[in-house]
Image (spheres, helix red, strand yellow):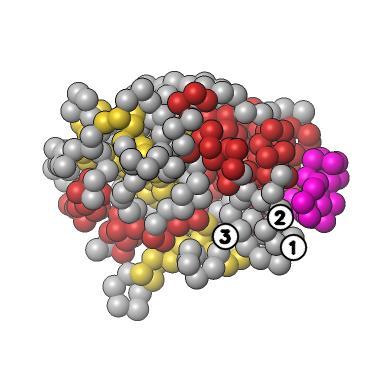
Amino acid sequence: MMPRRGMTGAAAALTVTLAAGALAAPASAATPRPGHGDHRHEATQGALDGIVAEGVPGVTAQVRDKYGSWNAASGVGDLRRGTPRGKHDSFRVGSITKTFVATVLLQLQAEGRIDLDDTVGKWLPGVVEGNEHDGDAITVRQILNQTSGIADYSRDDEFSRKVFSTEFFKHRYDTWTPEQLVKLAMRNKRVFEPGKGWGYSNTNYVVAGMIIKKVTGNAYGDEIERRVIEPLDLKATIAPGTRATMPRPSSRAYGKLPLDPEAKTYDVTELNPSFASSAGEVISDSADLNRFYSALLGGRLLPKEQLAEMKDTVSRGEDRGGRYGLGLIELTLPCKGTVKRTVWGHDGDLHGSSNLAVTTEDGSHSLALNMNGDWAGDADPVAEAEFCGK
């Protein structure tokens, strides 16, 4: 797991590199320029170009506001062929998956099928136990706002060895079940007493996915499809399960193995994403993410009471900045002078795919972007350019 830099830092990215051979990242890449009439987004385009200048192969983005949709890209989508990054690429969204999962659980609460103050033990008896973990002392709300203290399975030594070292080349198509992932976490001591701290743990959202299945009888991805994807007509959004390939259109994804001392760059496009499970395996595109967050903050997916609960935040600590709700991050952008803008959304990283999706409080102005490299690049300047007018 590698935390992201800058304002979006919480994602605790599942950043894995897998491929047959290493690739050299380009020193620079050709940058598609914005079309005529895109002057309102010149600063945003410049910030996207800046990400490529930092060393990321390419970036794709969309802005959605009262004027319509603006799609942009910079850099390359395939290092071998030198083809430009696509403006409508699909990509692995990583921890942005968490907002989808939290939305489903809040809908279930609105239907009276679950209470967020239920304990994890009520729904999953005996699952969260051992090394000071006690599912009977942890609430569903605490797993959603990352205050449960549950250990992060992605920091387990065995998991790290198989996923973040060169051993991953032998395991990249392995299937990991949610039960396996939680058991890995239980081998490690809890981080803090439930409710007594904040700590990003992917295990929380694997548990959340398991609870969705227990309550509904359906896999979390099926519930996302029925409750979010279909109503919003999100054509590029799927929960892939064990599917290793990417849908088209998409670019290649490039990453570095965190435990590779040589820090080589690999093509990491194809992999079995089950190790991310309901914590980060969803695939989408910028247009769908903007539609999702716009609908969510605009009140189309949750009743007022549940949306207010989702936006009830706790501090992520000074080192990360921002505040965390129920699968939703509140970010304050430092605009010119004393002016500040608040946006809501999430970031996410998964194997050569680094992402940010945010929207204004009323859902009227949204930005989503993806970088197809995980070793450089900062989304902060893009958000500031778009929402602050820099």
- Report if the CB atoms under discs 3 and 2 are less than 8 Å apart: no
Q: Is residue 114 above or below residue 222?
A: below
Observer-nearest of 179 and 258: 258
Q: Quadrant of residue 317?
A: bottom right
The residue type indicated by label 1 comes to: Glu
Q: Is residue 103 visible?
A: no
Question: How dense is the environment of label 3, judged by Cα within 10 Å: few (below 14), some, or many (20 and up)?
Answer: many
The residue type indicated by label 2 comes to: Arg
Q: Is residue 338 above or below residue 122?
A: below
Q: Which residue is mark 3?
A: 324
Position of the C terminus, as image quadrant, is bottom left
Observer-nearest of 59 and 188: 188
Question: How dense is the environment of label 2, judged by Cα within 10 Å: few (below 14), some, or many (20 and up)?
Answer: many
Regarding mark 2 in the picture, which secondary structure is present there? loop
Report how far apart the C-alphas of labels 3 and 2 lie in the structure.
20 Å
Q: Which of labels 3 and 2 is toward the front? A: 2
Q: Is residue 220 left or right of residue 239?
A: right
- Report if the CB atoms under discs 3 and 1 are less than 8 Å apart: no
Report x, y in % for residue 224: 61, 33
Q: Quadrant of residue 61?
A: top left
What is the span of residues highlighted in magenta in the rendered image?
A: 114-140
- Report if the CB atoms under discs 2 and 1 are less than 8 Å apart: yes
Report x, y in % for residue 64: 36, 46
Q: Is residue 137 left or right of residue 281?
A: right
Report x, y in % for residue 56: 27, 43
Observer-nearest of 324 and 244: 244
Q: Which residue is mark 1?
A: 193
Q: Is residue 377 left or right of residue 189?
A: left
Q: Which residue is mark 2?
A: 190
